[in-house]
Amino acid sequence: MSDSEDMTEFASIVERIERGEVPIKNIERELICPICKELFTHPLILPCQHSVCHKCVRELLMLNHEDSFDAGSECSLPGSPRSRVPSPSMERLDRLVRSGSISSPGWRRGSVTPRVTTIPCPGCQHDIDLGERGISMLFRNFTLENIVERYRQAARAAIAIMCNICKPPQQQEATKSCMDCKASYCNECFKLHHPWGTPKAQHEYVGPTTNFRPKVLMCPEHEMEKVNMYCEVCRRPVCHLCKLGGSHANHKVTSMSSAYKILKEKLAKSIHYLISKEDQVRTQITELDLLINQTEENGQLAERRANEHFERLFETLQERKSEMLRSIEQSRNRRLDQLKAQVEEYQGMLENSGLVGYAQEVLKETDQSCFVQTAKQLHIRIQKATESLRTFHPASDPCFDEFVLNTSREETLLKEMCFGGVPDPPLIDLSNSRVYNEASICWRLSDDHLPTDHHVLEYRRLGGPSQSPSQEDGEDSGVWRATDRVYGPSTVVCDLEPDSLYSFRVRSCRNSLFSPHSPEVTFHTPPAPAFGFLFSDKCGFSTERLILNKRRDTVESVASMAFLLAAERVQTGSYIGLDYIIGDMGITQGRHYWAFKVEPYSYMIKVGVASDSKLLEWFHNPRDTSSPRYDHDSGHDSGSEDACYELSQPFTLLTLGMGKLFIPKTSSSSSASTANASSGDPGNRVLPMPQRLGVCLDYDECRVYFYDADTMRCLYERQVDCSGTMYPAFGLMGSGKVQLEEFITAKRLTF
């Protein structure tokens, strides 16, 4: 599509918006600040490309300062996030901040506490570092300001903008606004203040507005410079000073016109695509509305069914409760009756009452025959009462131990009660899974997943280059193996064959019901066991130019003033030296593999292997090793190197930088092999930088291999002289960062 066609297409899209086919009121949710929930006021663009009101950014800094340093009542912000912030004009506030008259919020000059310039972005929830200059480094989003202003005018169409020159009660409605004077005028006042033949007649004027933006966007870091370039790394406009010696010196930049054209074309095509798919979008909206209704209905139905089940449980519990309480009551009444009868019996043994009183009356009988007739039975009763006194036993046991209720098992069942549906299958997380001679496989469940009991990981070997045809038909080929139960979101599979392709899948289990298997994912194991090492902070390590973290698994090179001063030697034909760092473990036999990540912004980094003798030579004479006359793979993509690798050397280094990987030249007698390296076209020797790079050293065969660690595709291989102890070697120039894989460093960090 030509430029004229693109501009015509974009113009038609804009006209459609202006005709009202896309009402501006429909975009209100895009014009709301995520912090204050109001229309944007002087929005600033954060480094993550989200916009926030100027006052809201200041308040976030103040609140962060209070939380970190307990700044006291002078920084407290009760109520609304806009309640305590002064509201000077935006232009005056920018001038004060840039001139240094005021500091960033939450920090006073001369304070012993560090200034706080990190805030959480309300859009993406990432921590944003504003740098030492704070909010003065942020651009105002003038485009968003204009859209908000048009929205305000559309919302208050009946409210006119009045002339700033006329005085009440004769104040007239404004007909135009001057962007240079930053004022609105009626027709008469505009002619009076912009007479023909004067410089003011050349001022830029627009329709009535209250939003005045500067004509030219200036650099926040260099106040007197206009922005004329676009940094593709930071995704923000920059000036030429930022590129020459500022924070964007090693970043890839493009001209502002090119960035404008590319971004405008992309936006126009995206808008055109969305508009062309309007019918499809409406159909999908209808389907979504139907799904919403179905979700609402099915959710209510599920609630009713769940309520019914719980009601039945409540009824069963209530019935069982009544039965058991009735049994307790019956036993209690029976025991009480027995004990009360025994009490009455014993009360009869008391004098002048009951049995004793009756016996005393019988003793008064004088007639012998009548006495004998009555006393015989009475004597038997007296004997029984006497015997009961000697061996007293309660008629009933007051303990109710047999009625103790144990509900622990039922409580456990109720707590574990869940829906009886089949669980959703998990998904294997490719970004966090790594495969070496051991596989660390991670997976994740859906956001609304139901609780699971455990997971089972299954894997099988699909084959490998070293596998013979008989092995391919054997038991181990293609047969799924299952791990033990896994109660977390990851597990480790050991004893994998090298240089082989493995497939993995996982499923979840709940209440003895298994979910379907997750989609299969395949990983290629490295050609050799993983070699564990950390960066060495002793041998040749430059503490002035290299930064090594505490774990010694990440090294970073930062371009500094010394780097710029050393660059003057380029004019005399001498090259700046590399800063080398090696692994703390050496290799003297066998095959070994390690992997690492090089940050895409890195200027130039060399990776590979080197012998101990060669390293000593480099560390004692670093200047010569950086010359292309000595190290034939200088890392430049110009193709100007005249020499090629010799047949065998005690080192091999591959160059990466600026998001590219450079394959060294090879001569006809060289043993290096790769399709791109053998080609004479320099363009074929430049490849995109892999996200992860792997290196395999075969010490016994004297060969080194470089792999794309994600696909295990061999990018380059060559012969190397393994006459001594070989070390993983890294050389950095300019800004750059190398991070070892966690699996490579795990064994060393446990010691």
Image (cartoon, rainbow, N blue to C red):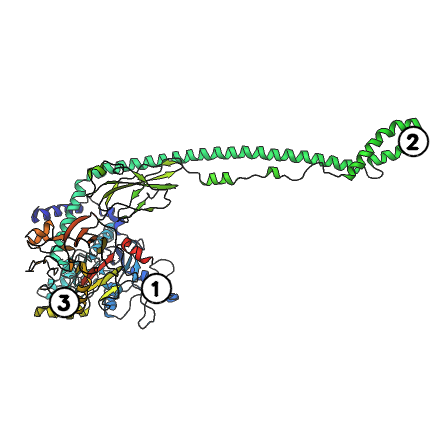
Q: Secondary structure at mark 1?
A: helix
Q: Secondary structure at mark 2?
A: loop
Q: Amino acid at mark 2?
A: Glu
Question: Which one is nearer the viewer's eye here, 479 or 565?
Answer: 479
Horizontal placement of 424 versus 586: left or right?
A: right
Q: Is residue 348 visible?
A: no
Residue 405 lies, in percent from the top left, at: 56, 39
Q: Amino acid at mark 1?
A: His
Question: Does 232 sit above or below residue 74?
Answer: above
Q: Amino acid at mark 3?
A: Ile
Q: Earlier in the sequence, mark 3 or mark 2?
A: 2
Instruction: Find disc 2 in the rendering and name its residue.
Output: 365
Residue 359 lies, in percent from the top left, at: 86, 34
Question: Which one is nearer the viewer's eye here, 574 or 181?
Answer: 574
Instruction: Find disc 1 in the rendering and name its residue.
Output: 65
Instruction: Find disc 3 in the rendering and name its residue.
Output: 576
Question: Does 223 sit above or below residue 666?
Answer: below
| Alpha-carbon span between mark 3 and mark 1 | 43 Å
Local packing at callout 1 (Cα closer than 10 Å; few below 14, some 14-19, many 20+) is many
Is mark 3 in CB contact (under 8 Å) with mark 2? no
Is mark 2 in CB contact (under 8 Å) with mark 1? no
Horizontal placement of 279 versus 296: left or right?
A: left
In the picture, residue 522 is in which quadrant? top left
